[in-house]
Image: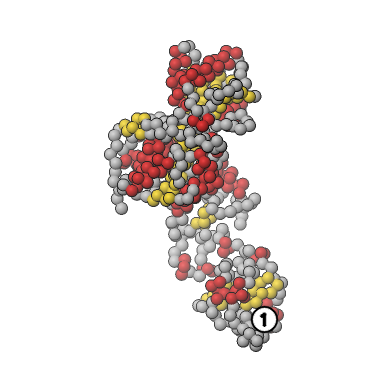
Amino acid sequence: MAFDKMELKDIEVWDGNFAAAQALRQAQVDVVAAYPITPSTPIVEGYAKFKSDNYVEGEFVMVESEHAAMSGCIGAAAAGGRVATATSSQGLALMVETLYQASGMRLPIVLNIVNRALAAPLNVNGDHSDMYLCRDSGWIQFDAFSPQGAYDLNFIAFKVSEDHDIRLPAIVNQDGFMTSHTAQGVHTLADDDAFGFVGTFKPMNDMLDFEHPVTHGVQTEEDWHFEHKARQHSDLMLKVSPKIDEVFADFEKLTGRKYSQVECYDIDDADVAVFCLGTSVETAREVAGEMRTKGIKAGVIGLRVIRPFPFEQVQEALKNIKAVAILDRSSPNGAPGAMFNEVCAAMYSHESSPLISGYVYGLGGRDLTKAHLVDLYNELQTNADAGKVTTQLQQFIGVRGPKLSFL
Amino acid sequence: MAKKGWDEFEIGAMLRTFDGKIDNIAGTRQEDRSYSENSSYMASVADWRLIKPVFNKDYCIDCQFCWIYCPDVSIISRDKKLIGVDMDHCKGCGICVEVCPTNPKSLLMFPEQADEETEIASWPKKDEEEA
């Protein structure tokens, strides 16, 4: 069975969803089992249309829920195919149980999460609540800041995930609507180059190898479970990070686009920095540039790889900064922000650490404006000058009503 | 099974049924297959059993009902003749006895500690009422 190739311009105007769908087509994904949910639906819808139009050779499995979607993906991955799907928010919440199955079974699956708030109140817009929901699920987790990132990171995710030394599923996050539905120029790869980069799927322990029958999804109790989880954690801690660096380097060779686990912008001489995820990185970069014209040495750090958490790279990026703000786009609901805690843990064990303050922002699609960031950089400069955090450790940005801060 | 360390087994929640490559497994008898130590065939679950089936070949008509109905493939049949019960995998459910059509039955359940030869020697006679 042959499929048609698609002629792409060097730069196409795509939103994040279509960019991800194109990546799934170019990677020639064998099976997509999916259930639609805003704002991720166009990714799997895009794959389905490419398949109907004979641009991809694969199977689209329509299922009854997101739980079933990931279950279908797990079955297909265990059978021995290249597998992907997409979801958001409530759908991801329903899928979470099966995420742990996929990673524990060491099955390479690429899941595009278009980040969206979690109800209640019901909300379809972007924040990172769902991202944190699967924080400890054992998946490799990438974060795109733009449609270009959503496109590129899918290829990178397949290549890392499917490597026989890795065999762990990978998530590509992108911001709901701000990335998923905002069209931008995306530098494309030709079909052959894209597929050549990802490579032909190489099965491992696949159920379709009838000469070597395997049982997937076995049960272990107190005598074996700990060893399996230890092995998975060890591989995430030791093997994945070097593999990601290797694949990032290969990708740069092919495209000229350079990715790092911790993306640093104007950091080398910076006194103050904002540490964030998603589309906020680009807003913060613009404001950092403007702050520099006002004499504040501002920088931005964007976390490209959330899991495995690049502990040492974060230490390296922050060690010479005087004051840093960690932005959490999710309500921690009774604790400091999740990202705040992780960065604090990294810097507490490093000989030099910036003053660290945490900010909760952008819940349910609330904009993070340039004015917010100007105030934030000024506050960080005050902290840097004072040699201590002059505010409370956790503040809310952009919420109406009396100023909200804690700790 | 030897208790291996966390770095000593294949990744994934995955076990292999056989050692090495297999060929024509459907045409190979269980005792001739290269089951791996991880296969359930190699594990005994006999300690689950409280009562056990005893087979009396004098009354068996080799109808194979017990072989078909056994949920654990524990009836051993060769050339369409019942030759015994796999006591490592039989869990004592008694379905084989339930489906046995002979009079008296060719399989009966006895306490786990019962002596097989003694029970066969005192096997129930034909039930004339049922006949």
Q: Is residue A22 left or right of residue A278?
A: left
Residue furthest top in the image:
A295
- Residue depicted at 57% across the width and 67% down the height: B72
Q: Quadrant of the C terminus of chain B?
A: bottom right
In terms of depth relative to the viewer, which is nearer, B122 or A146? Answer: A146
Colour scheme shown:
secondary structure
- SS of the residue under disc 1: helix
Query: Could you say where residue A10 lies in the image, as x and y percent from the top left?
Result: 30, 33
Chain letter for mark 1, please. B
Quadrant (top left, top right, bottom left, bottom right) of the N terminus of chain B: bottom right
Placement of A320 over or under A24, stated as above or below: above
Q: Amino acid at mark 1?
A: Ile
**Residue A205 left/right relative to A345:** left
The residue that appears at 59% across and 76% down in the rendered structure is B99
Residue that badge 1 annotates = B120
A117 shown above or below A402 = below
In percent of the image, x 61 and y 17: which residue is there? A390
Relative side of B105 to A188, left or right = right
Res A19 visible: yes
Q: Position of residue A88 (x, y in %)?
A: 48, 39
Crowdedness near tag 1: few (<14), some (14–19) or many (≥20) residues, C-alpha within 10 Å: some
Can I make out residue A308 in this image?
no
